[in-house]
Image (tube, helix red, strand yellow):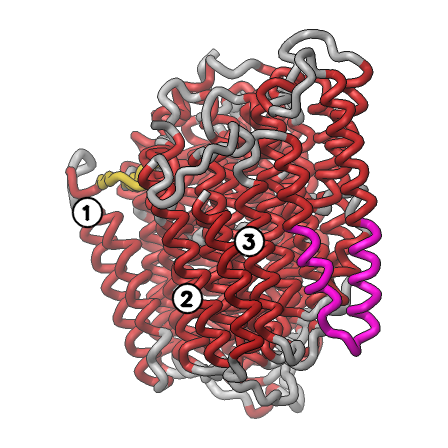
Amino acid sequence: MNAIIFSAVWGVVMMFSGAFSKNKSLVRYLAIIGSALLLLVNIADLTSQGSPFFQIDTKNMLVFKVFGLLINCVAFGSTLIYFLLSSKDIEEVGPNSGDYFALIFFVLCGVSITTSYNNLLMLFIGIEILSIPLYILTGSSKRNLKSNEAALKYFLMGAFSTGIMLLGIAFLYGASKTGSFFIDEIGIGKAPASPLFVVGLLLMIVSLSFKVSAAPFHFWTPDVYDGSPTVFTSFMATVVKGAAFVAFIRLFADSFVDAQPQWELIIAIIIAATLFIGNITAVFQQSVKRMLAYSSIAQVGFMLFAILGVGAKTNTAQEGIVLYIAAYSLATIGIFAILIKLKDHSFDGFNGLAKQQPLLAATNTVFLLSLAGIPLTAGFFAKYYMLSTALQTGKFFWLVIFAVLCAAVSVYYYFRVIQAMYFKEGEPQQIEVSTGFKSLLVIVAFAIVVLGVFPQLLINLLSSILYF
Amino acid sequence: MIPVLLIAIPLLSGLVGFFIKNGDNAKKWSLFISLATLAVSVYGLTLDKASAALHFEAEWIPSLGSKFSVALDGMSQILSLLTAISFPIIFIATYNKEYKTPGKFYALMLLSQAGLIGVFVSVDALLFYFFWELALIPVYFLSSIWGGEKRIQATFKFFIYTFVGSLLMLVGIIYLYAHTADHSFSLQSFYKLKSAISGKDQSWLFWLFFIAFAIKMPIFPFHTWQPDTYEQSPTAVTMVLSGVMVKMGLFGLIRWLAPVIPGGTWLWGDTASALCIIGMIYASLSAIQQDDLKRLVAYSSIAHIGLMCLAVFATTETGLQGVMIQMFNHGINIIALWIVVELIERQLGTRKISELGGLAQKAPSLAILLVIVSLANVALPLTNAFVGEFLMFSGIYTSTATTYNVVFTVTAGISIILSAVYMLNMIQKVFFGNTNALTENAKDIKWNEKAILAVIVIMIVVVGVFPQPALELTKTTVHAILEKMNYK
């Protein structure tokens, strides 16, 4: 609860700070402090098991379980790192940097609602609070046609998918015996599904697939990610995607787990399509930014395995998804932070970076290896968990093999960047990065490697919290 | 503690190596470290097999049931010895070569050594998988940064191939892990699985692992990365790849596949053997056609590895003993061949057989040493390879695991004859005949190169005449593995 209130309040503070202070760096520091405080507040929530500050009766519309709070931690932590690395670049998007930071805090408010909803209306509100600031951020580069196009496209498609979600909620409401929006009451248990329920379920799958950009509802992703200012793409592809994904997995774990035979094949097909389209299309991209957009689609394909695994007796799916989102967010934010510093966003823009900026190249390599899921990085254990979740279901062996082959394809496009940095000669680009930026990148890369070698550190934390 | 040292010494000093700027210091540092590793490895050989120093176990990821668990048994001893011997040989033989950013080159070399030894000593499947990749990544960078003209495509192909294989193996490992009684990755738990997994599952599990190992060895039809990568890599890396790294595939087959999934191995043994046979004949015929020395040695390596893989599927004691000793011998012999290729190329600037000739007049000691190494490569008596290949052939011939033992023996024998054809043909064209404009001014090799080739020749002859200690070393391992393979 505290995170929801704090992020909303801080968003307002950020809005006014821009109006009252002409000093840009003050605004920036406020944003960084805000995200750090937000993380602390959320950790306080997590550890105290009961809100230490505000006690608000939400009529059970929101519940604050550890899983959601953990995801909040990952989201706020990623935002903090994102601010530390890229907040200066946010200022350069346009004159009103306070507004951008405010919008980001409003998105975080939406994130904390989506991770804690217990009622479909709250899911809807959360997703909307999350999405509307994003439409604005996407179009924030006002004089850029691509940015405008992306914003319009995102808005139209997003509004459409929200409509589908509302329709789905309505059907589920009608199908539930008691006429309820609560997620523990809309499930039908093991009873045979009514047509109303099936339609509602399908509509929910469609709209949530849209939000996490799973195929075949991914068409907006590359254009929106490519068109919006690169700093905001980084945020969208990590924090927002993670939160939307949590909405997805919570709905299926809490409401529809008993109806798994009804939907598991659909999800399996969505996974296969997402992996295939994401990976194969990424291979043909010429721009690293667009490649990362497709790679984020491909990564969602892997994350969706967690949904197949919600029926398992163990918490592997939940543990795995927290690890996956953390590993993916850290690596992606790092890559984007470096990408923003380069003027040329094509693969050739990375040529010779290893000579020019050996430290940037080395950390970027760690991030890319982690995304590709190479051992010794956190990304390996993320993928490991997803594969073992899928194998535990005992079905869909074909899907696991398919996913593994797709992962091999992903090596192709991630390594193109490594090849450009290390093995190709390039014209020297003048890149100015501060020591603080470099050392933070090194810390993030180091964290990825430590998690890759000693995953026990995080697993202990996760299992001690998730199993109590 | 010995296996931990064998991994830790090159790993840590490799990380230090990244910070050495001066080329000479980097060379000396890595040579010193590799000799220290060799000393530890030799010390490990002198210990009693039951000695506690040969085992080490520590908690790693308890919630997944994975331990940092390493041990040296006979097979691990002989392969880590091979790794430990190879690196000093490689460093000395290429001592006169200059690399750009030498600190990084030698650092990556040491890291790959750590990965290789880690693969050979791990008795935990997840740890094995980690080292399997740790060995690969430095080699990828080594080949791609310091390799030949088409290095980027060639090594990338190599990386993708092996990565696909490792991922398939990972799926297999997770599957086996999920079925262990105590949810553990340890080799012992995997060994207990064989009756718990149905024949149908064993059947496809076999391929998950076999493809991974077959790519590494390489076995036809997964070999297409190999000649290109060997050709494009800097020779020092090619030596690592062909001398030591291909043994990872054979090692995996013997340790992690055949005894863990004996049903699948028995079911598909003939198919896999047939692939080996096809590969041997195909590679030998290709080797005859090659004009490039590096490609010739590369194809010859495919043929020899095929024979070893074939002997594993024969499931006989003599055959498996032959494989053990031959893994070591092949590593030594092929490194010697690469050294010769490297010396010729560095001096004359070409590897084309058609452009060379009459070198024996100008470089007599090189010629003598090469002839001995080549004879070992065609398994002439008194050389080390004779012992290994003789044992393997008798193992394949007496095999009861297959009904095609005679066919396999005869076709494998043909490939040995073919190997004599291309090796002798190469010697004749490169070293004998008339000199030409290019070879007119060739000089003989330097003392360090002479010394290192002489050491190898001595090893070839000693193991060839007196193989008993090596056979004793691997005897218990071979028995244990065979017992698990013949579970029917």
- Work out how far the residue at label 3 is from the one at label 2, CA to CA, in angstroms: 15 Å
Q: Is residue A19 left or right of residue B86?
A: right
Give the labeled residue for mark 2.
Answer: A33
Q: Disc 1 on helix, strand or loop?
A: loop
Asked if marks 3 and 1 touch (Cβ < 8 Å), the reply is: no
Q: Which residues are magenta?
A: A130-157
Asked if marks 3 and 2 touch (Cβ < 8 Å), the reply is: no
Magenta stretch: dominant secondary structure:
helix
Q: Quadrant of residue A423?
A: bottom right
Give the labeled residue for mark 1.
Answer: B1
Amino acid type at mark 1: Met
Q: Residues within 10 Å of mark 1 (few under 14, many from 20)?
A: some
Q: Nearer the viewer, mark 3 or mark 1?
A: 3
Q: Residues within 10 Å of mark 3 (few under 14, many from 20)?
A: many
Amino acid type at mark 2: Ile
Q: Chain of mark 3?
A: A
Q: Magenta stretch: residue A272 in it?
A: no
Give the labeled residue for mark 3.
Answer: A108
Q: Quadrant of residue A255?
A: top right
**Residue at (61, 68) in percent of width and height:** A100
- Work out how far the residue at label 2 is from the one at label 1, CA to CA, in angstroms: 48 Å
Q: Disc 3 on helix, strand or loop?
A: helix
Q: Is residue A81 left or right of residue B84?
A: right
Amino acid type at mark 3: Leu
